[in-house]
Amino acid sequence: MVRSATIRQALYSGQVDEADRQRRWFEVADEGWRRLSAARPLGRLLLEALQNAFDEAAPLVTVTLSPERVVVEDDGPGGIVDERLVYTIFLSDKPDDPTRRGRMGRGLKELLASMDRARVETVGRTVTFDEAGRTIEDNPRERGTRLVLERGFDDGALSEARALLGLCIPPRGTRLLIDGRAVRRPRSVLALSGCSLETVVVADGVERAALGQTTLSVFAPRKGEAPHLFEMGLPIEPWNVPWHVDVAQRVPLKEGRDSVPDRYKLAVKAALLEAMIHSYLDRSDLRGDWVHDVIAAWPLSSSLLDAYVSRVFPRGSVLGGTSRANDRARQLGAHIIDAAGISHGAYVSLARVLETSDDYVRRRSREFGGEDVEPDEAQRRFADAVRWIARAAAGRVVRVRFFARDPSDAGLLEDAVTDVERREIAFNVRGPLRFEDILEPMTLGVVLHEIAHLETPEHDHRFIDRLQHLAGKTARLLAEGGPELAAKLRAGDPDRGGREPRE
């Protein structure tokens, strides 16, 4: 078999002899090529014509669409330098440069093949495709190229084509007109240079993946437009990023050339997040689905994850764990990030920079344990009153302990802790509790709160019901006991003459 480079050279020079033809493996069936090309949307096919005009830096490109005919014309300085580039599939004169649009000489031929009749007028030559076949003749044209494409186009196809072509971002210095209306460039947001992304190079007629340094241009979508990913000004597909993003080099495309692999989109999103997180993205931006995509599936640095967490979540946030640990962490002042609300990938990423509620509770419990304190006279009276309320209102016998602990570095100060298993309530002597007056509203509220935790350590409906029950019984107890009971509670001797509440 003749090597591909040799065949390509021979095709280009027109010197393919009979022996070469016999050694070739394949022939292209015109009808099959036409059906394959015609299956592509009209707008996608017309983008193939625009990319050639954009590459030639044509000052003016016009597209006129009608039900029977589409005309694409540019005034580029050179036109098509060799007529065989119009009809020889996979023949291309573009250098192996990933900043040039197009791939392996397919696009223009697909556009022409999808039509019933077509004419290509370029500098000095006109190539006509019709029922009689292909004919070539001279013309006096001195600049640019004009494509006349004929076939029956329905209104839906024309409307979709206009919308897709209207998304284009013409190169600076190129004016694009669609049915006489100029396509304006969208408002630029920023340009990110030096982004390392996968691109496509063509070596010996074979497309290969390679890494290339490129620029990502970020634009605000024009009114009524959905954000799209672009390749050098040509729209590829809509995506969930809030901006148009134009990649200044060839991008890897899936079959059909109207979408990119998910991994590539993720790489572009990661580049945007890394560049924009500190200066351009606010909290609402960072809560977008596209950011979650990156957090969940891209290997980000710990410093970027820290920046994300500090911008998105309140101070003191921890990842949700067991329900009991979550509840205890809330008591200790943490904000719980609900694990059910994020993907497993995001949870794993955030766990690199955040504690889980279980770890947080273990750490804070050690910090909040404090030193045991021998109670003074007022604290002993307070302990007697707590035991009496627990027995009278809750029917529980409890132990009371005192400890001393200053606020943490984060400013958290725990007033009291209940150990359900030991049936022990511990009070912090350095907190705001009024040990000399258990009936002070905040102090009594803390006491009842901790007694309610003897029923359940969590702040669930069972806890709320229990706390409401205790509050009601204590209120009735105080109402029936009157000032005498109140005085005895403050004195730490409620059993002397005090009455148990009636059921």
Image (cartoon, rainbow, N blue to C red):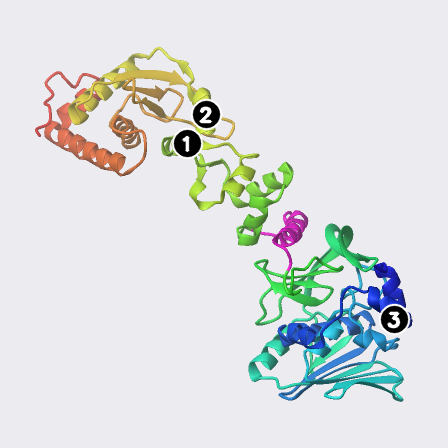
* Earlier residue among tags 3 and 2: 3
In the picture, the quarter occupied by the N terminus is bottom right
- Give the image quarter of residue 176: bottom right
Residue 18 disc label: 3
Residue 268 belongs to the span the image colors magenta: yes
Q: Is mark 1 on a helix, strand or loop?
A: helix
In this rendered view, identify the residue nearer to me: 144 or 465. Answer: 144
User: What residue is pinned by disc 2?
Assistant: 364
User: How far across and how far down the image is residue 294, in percent?
Assistant: 59, 48
User: Position of 39 compared to 195: left or right?
Assistant: left
- Tell whether label 1 touches label 2 (CB within 8 Å): yes
Q: What element carries label 2?
A: helix
Which of pointers 3 and 1 indicates the residue nearer the eye?
Answer: 3
User: How far across and how far down the image is residue 365, in percent?
Assistant: 43, 23
Q: Residue at x 47, y 24 (%)?
A: 363
User: Position of 233 compared to 389: left or right?
Assistant: right
In the picture, the quarter occupied by the C terminus is top left
Question: As shown in the figure, which amino acid type bears the numbered disc 3?
Answer: Glu
Magenta part of the chain: 260-282
Give the Cα separation between the discs numbered 3 and 2.
86 Å
Q: Name the main secondary structure of what is drawn in magenta.
A: helix
Note whether residue 166 is visible.
no
Give the Cα separation between the discs numbered 2 and 1.
8 Å
User: What residue is pinned by disc 1?
Assistant: 329
User: How far across and how far down the image is residue 457, in percent?
Assistant: 31, 29
Which of pointers 3 and 2 indicates the residue nearer the eye?
Answer: 3
In this rendered view, identify the residue nearer to me: 31 or 177. Answer: 31
Question: As shown in the figure, which amino acid type bears the numbered disc 1?
Answer: Ala
Question: As shown in the figure, which amino acid type bears the numbered disc 2?
Answer: Arg
Give the Cα separation between the discs numbered 3 and 1.
83 Å
Residue 206 belongs to the span the image colors magenta: no
Q: Residues within 10 Å of mark 2 (few under 14, many from 20)?
A: some
